[in-house]
Image (cartoon, rainbow, N blue to C red):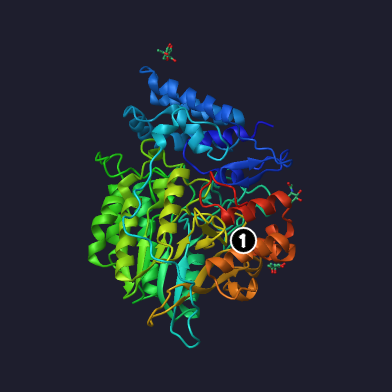
Amino acid sequence: MMRWLPLLFVALLGTTLTILVEAAPAPELTIEFDENQIYTEDGKNVVTCNLCATIVEDVVIMLENGTVTDDQIINYIINTCARLNIFSNPDQVCGGMAAIALPTIKYIFSTGVVIPGNICGMLLQGQECGLSDPESLEWTIAPSSNIKPPVNQPSQPPTGSPTIKVLHLADIHYDPEYLSGSNAMCGDPLCCRASSGDVVNATDAAGYWGDYRTCDLPWYLIENAVSQMATRHPDVGYIIWTGDLTPHDVWSTAKDENIMIIDRLMTLVSQYFPNVPVYPTLGNHESHPVNTFAPPEITDPEFNTAWLYDEADRQWARWLPAEVSSTIRYGGFYTALVQPGLRIVSMNMNYCYTLNYWTYFKSQDPASSLLWLSQVLEEAELAGEKVHILSHIPPGNGDCWTIFSREFAKIINRFESTVAAQFYGHTHKDEYKIFYDTVDVNRPVNVAFIAPSLTTYSRLNPGYRTYTVDGQRPDSTWSVLDFNTYIMNLTDANQQGSEVDPVWFELYQAKQEYKLTDLTPQSMDDLFHRMKADDALFQLYYKNYYKNADEAVAESCNNRCKTNMLCRIVITDIADQSKC
Ligand SMILES: *[C@@H]1O[C@H](CO)[C@@H](O)[C@H](O)[C@H]1NC(C)=O
Ligand SMILES: *[C@@H]1O[C@H](CO)[C@@H](O)[C@H](O)[C@H]1NC(C)=O
Ligand SMILES: *[C@@H]1O[C@H](CO)[C@@H](O)[C@H](O)[C@H]1NC(C)=O
C-alpha cells in the first residue's frame, strides 16, 4: 500500500507525477490522477505532507553534511527507489535522474536562498501542506497605470469575412530510439526501446505506429502526421507550436541529444510547410536536466539555461523577425506581429513550473516575464492590436505555481479586451480553461485553448488541432471562431500494420460538437454549466479529452473523475477552487 511513496520521491527528483503514475500502476490501489493530486478509489488524497517533509528533510541533511559524497546521495536515492520497488531498473532510472540533477540541486542549495520548509507547500500546492515562510513567496505585478477601457460585447464577424486557419502542434515527444516490437511493459518511465528489456508476452510488444503504454513516437509516425497535415490543410496561415519535442527518458537526457531532436523536428515542419510562419515556445522537456530553467541572473554556464535559449533563438530565426532575439536569449520569450492588428506573445511558462528546481530559488516573476507581458499588452492596447498568448504550461495547472498563476490571471483580466485568445499544451489532453473577472467573479473574461498531444504518452491517440480565427478586416476581433481536433486510431493503425498508412480523421468540430453559437468566454462558460447538468454532453467532452482512445472510452468517468475534469476548466489559479 506504500506505492505512492516513490511517486512523491521521484517527483522531487524532477520528473512528473504523470510519468510516475503511468509507469507504476499499483494493482491493489485504483489511482486517479489529476496533476499533483493522487486519489484512492474512495477519494482520499494519498500523497501526504508529512511524507514530503520527511524526504526533503533527509535530502537537506545530506546536502548540509560536508562529508556526504555525491555517490552516497545517489546511492541513497537508488536504495530508496529499489526498496519501494517502483521501477524495474532503479539503478538506471533513479540513479540516472539523481546523477543528472544533483549538481544543479547542490548549486541551488549552496546559494542559501532555498527555504526547505516551503518546498512541500509549493510542490504539493492545493493540499495545504503549509509554508514555513509564506511571506517570502509573496509578490505582485504592479497594475498598468492606464485606465482599463470599457469592455465591449464581442461581435461575431459578418458572414463572408476573411478567416485565418491556424495549425497547433503540441507535445510531439519524438523518441529517436523507438523500436517497433520492443518491450512496451518495461517498468521505466519510457519503454518501447531496444534497451527496454525482453518481451515476455506477445501482448507486451510495442506497436508499429506507436503504443498506448509509456512510449513516445517513432520518427515515421511523426513524418506521416506532418505530411498529412500539409496535404489536408494547405490553407494554413501560420503554425503555433507549444513545445515538448523530446522523449520522456528523463533519466538519460543530454543537451546535444535535445538539440538534435529540436533541429530535426523544426527542419521537418519547415520542409512540409515552406513559407508558413511558425511561432514556437519551449516545453519543460526541452531542457537538461529536464524541467530546469534558470532565471537570467544565473550566469554560470554550467547551470544557466543560455545553451537552450541561444539554440531556440537560432532555430526559430527561420520564422521570427530579428528583433525577438534579445528576449529569447534573456528568458525564452518573445513577441512578434503576425499581421497588422494581430500580435503573438510567446511566454516561457516553465518559470511557473513547480518541478523546475529554480522555482525554489526564485518564484517571484523570474526573468520579469509577467511584468514584460503586462507592458507588451499595454502597448498593444494603445496600438489597437489584439494579442494571442501562447505557451507550454497552462497557468492554473496543478504544477504551475499559484502566485504566478494568480498574477497572470490578473493581467489577463486587465487586458481582457486585448487578449483575443490563449493557447497551451503540456497536459496532452484536449481541453480548455476559462478565466473570470476578479471582482464580478462569475463574468468570464478569457479562454485558454489546450491542444491535444501528438504523442500517445500515455493511453492516448495521436492528435492535433486547427483553429479558424477572425481574419484581416476593419475591427477584426482576431478571436477563435471554431476549432477542429484531428486524430488517428492507434489500435486500428497497428492492426493494419506497417504497409498501410494510418488514417487521420477529424474527431470533432467544436461549435457543432458542443452546440456552441460561438467560442466567446461567455459561450465556453455556458458550455461548462451545460456539461454539469447534461451528462451525455459531458461524456462527449470526456471522450474527446482522451482523443477517443479505446481504453479511456471503455472505462467510464465516475463522479470524482467528472468533478476533476470539469474543475480543470474553471481553475486558473490552483489555490482558488471556488468555481468548481
Ligand atoms: C555526516 O555524515 C556522516 C556519514 O554519514 C556522519 O557520520 C556524520 O555524523 C554526519 N555529520 C553531521 C554533522 O551530521
Ligand atoms: C499475456 O498477456 C495476456 C493479456 O494481457 C494475458 O491474458 C496472458 O495471461 C499473458 N500470458 C502470459 C504467459 O503471461
Ligand atoms: C479503433 O479501431 C479499433 C480496431 O479497428 C476498433 O475496434 C475501435 O472501435 C476503434 N475505436 C474507435 C473509438 O472508433
Residue 348 appears in the picture as rendered: yes
Residue 500 visible at all: no
The one of 110 and 141 positioned closer to us in this rendering: 141
Helix, strand, or loop for circle 1? helix
Q: Measured from the top left, where is residue 329 in percent x and y?
A: 26, 53
Q: Position of residue 377 (x, y in %)?
A: 34, 61
Q: Is residue 50 left or right of residue 56?
A: right
Residue located at (29% from left, 63% from top): 379
Residue 535 location (% of width, % of height): 74, 62
Count of numbered marks:
1
For this rendering, which residue is in front, 213 or 150? 150
Specify the quadrant that holds the N terminus: top right
Which residue position holds label 1? 545
Q: Does residue 347 lie above or below 253 as drawn?
A: below
* Callout 1 crowding tier (Cα within 10 Å): few <14, some 14–19, many ≥20: many
Between 2 and 498, the residue placed more toward the observer is 2
* Residue 52 position within the rendered picture, expressed as x and y whole percent measured from the top left: 54, 30
Amino acid bearing label 1: Tyr
Q: Quadrant of ligand 3?
A: bottom right
Residue at (62% x, 56% y) in the render: 212
- Single out the residue that lies furthest toward the bottom: 160
Question: Residue, x 46% and y 48% (percent of image)?
Answer: 406
Q: Is residue 113 above or below residue 295?
A: above
Quadrant hosting residue 51: top right
Q: Quadrant of residue 20?
A: top right
Disc 1 under 8 Å from ligand 3? The reply is no
In the image, 173: left or right of 562?
left
In the picture, measured across the screen, residue 107 lies left or right of residue 525, that is: left
* 301 to 117, vertically: above or below: below
